[in-house]
Amino acid sequence: MNKSNERDGMDQVTKAATTAPDLAVPFESCLTEERPEPCIIVIVGASGDLTSRKIVPALFNLYLNNGLPNPFLILGCARTNLSTPEFRDRMKNALKTVDILDDSKWQVFSSSLYYHSIDYEEPSSFNAMAEYLRELNKKHGTKGNRIFYLAIPPSLYKSTAQMLGKAGLSQEGEGVNDWVRIVVEKPFGRDLDSAIDLDQSLHEHFREHQIFRIDHYLAKETVQNILMFRFANAIFEPIWNRRYIDHVSITAAESLGVEHRAGYYEQAGVLRDMFQNHMMQILALTAMDPPSLFEADRVRDEKVKVYRTMRPFPTDDLQGYLVLGQYSAGSIDGKQVPAYRDEPGINPDSLTPTFAMMKVFLDNWRWQGVPFYLTSGKRLAKKITEIVIQFKEVPHSMFRAILGEHITANRLILGIYPDEKISLTFQTKNPGARVCLRSVTMDFHYHQNYTGPILDAYEKVLLDCMLGDHMLFWRQDGVELCWSFLTPILKECETCGDRSKLLLPYNSGTSGPDATKNLMK
Ligand code: NDP
């Protein structure tokens, strides 16, 4: 710790001893049935984008909704040399930027924020962090409970987890309190080998129950609702299989381009950025069997069973199962946007895919022969995330003589963004003497008739981590199975002789390369 930082930090601790942040609220108004235990959340990489845009705003919102424990502290750590007041000012600006600053509440919340600069490569720096944490813990009574949130580039996950461990910071106490958790952001590795390697490093100092592998997509209300919808209603499950379902489409389309994350995206591409995590989670929630209990490991067991059934793609016929694309210039909402290769920070000859559609088959009794079309891409016509369950046509049409052979089949849409809704399309008779059918839609909007607090995805994952609930976090076996499926595909795409053949251009503002139509035949 540098001197000014040290002095400043200690001043804050001393001050806080007399003016301890009072985050106390009546228990009934808490967002959860049980209030999380007192703790300190240590954000490693606190000078970065994720901290400003997501983590601290989520914690502030939790505070506004009375969802934080009491006492509760945030310790920001990074290389950047900041004092605690400077860190607080930064975070205040961050809340202003995302438009949630409430000046009357900021005062108390800000007194729970501290900063401590670290050098990621210097063990003594982590020893100093440990000392500072002990001091904060003693002054504020956070009971030794701590969460380390790794909001740093993935290349630093391994070494940082090891540094924390070597400084004794991964050790839990004997009692119920004094727990230690580590939150790892996506991506969990670049391929199967690196994912296993990262996991082994984490396990050198942390045990599995301490590790929280975040996928904030899972914490979206409407994603969580997939399980409620499927398993709390008796009428859907009997038809949720190959006898009644023709195909399933899962789409996560974005109209934005690569934005400010060029460095990361160039290395990742759409398969690592979206498919290895979010798309696989939605696939599992849509396709899994009902767990016996709504409990973290039972649910994760069923997801893992889905991943085990994914049929590997034949690498000599990738085009039969996968379309990859990269956006060219185009127009979105009447605005001209540049090609991916012309974006700042992108290699002008880049072969990074920004779009993918894949046709996945699950080899089990429920889903044999039913294609799951997974699509995700950047700079598409509009931002939309949805799951479409396309049912089969009626087996025999008694209206054939009057209406012809085809009757539009039923369709169920689980909308995740922008419309958080469930729609069911079915046929009805048109009023009048003539026999003719029309397709109508029954809509349910997720927030209809609900006035309580709404948790954003990062708020939910942070709250669950404080509560020690692993339900919405990845388990390592799931991570490895998904990498086992994707790694041969990535290898083929990234090493085949003519990579540009696999990568099709598409104009920004469209629905992706035309070749997707062939995949759906
Ligand atoms: P940043 O690139 O903003 O980096 C976070 C901090 O890490 C920086 O402020 C910097 O702090 C430190 N850092 C950056 N590069 C290096 C380096 N080469 N060596 C040492 N320290 C470095 O990352 P984000 O905040 O965007 O993301 C953090 C993690 O979260 C990443 O793993 C990312 O994949 C993941 N993530 C991010 C999302 C987002 O929207 N931003 C969304 C989902 C996941 P300092 O120099 O002060 O030490």
Image (spheres, rainbow, N blue to C red):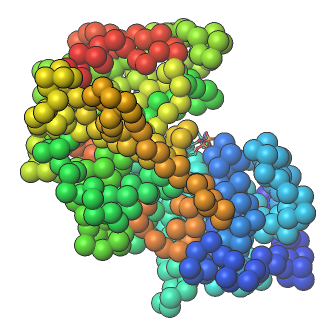
Q: Position of residue 73 (x, y in %)?
A: 72, 71
Taking the image as shown, residue 503 lies to the left or right of residue 178, namely: left
Please report the residue visible at 41 percent of the width from the left and 66 percent of the height from the top.
Answer: 471
Above/below status of 303 relative to 30: above
Can residue 64 be seen here?
yes
Q: Position of residue 190 (x, y in %)?
A: 37, 39
Viewer-side residue, 273 vs 377: 377
Can residue 214 be seen here?
no
Ligand 1 is found in the corner quadrant, namely: top right
Taking the image as shown, residue 362 lies to the left or right of residue 292, namely: left
Q: Position of residue 340 (x, y in %)?
A: 52, 15
Quarter of the image that includes the C terminus: top left
Please report the residue visible at 17 percent of the width from the left and 29 percent of the height from the top.
Answer: 399
Q: Residue furthest front?
A: 433
| Residue 228 in which image quadrant | bottom left
Taking the image as shown, residue 296 lies to the left or right of residue 1, namely: left
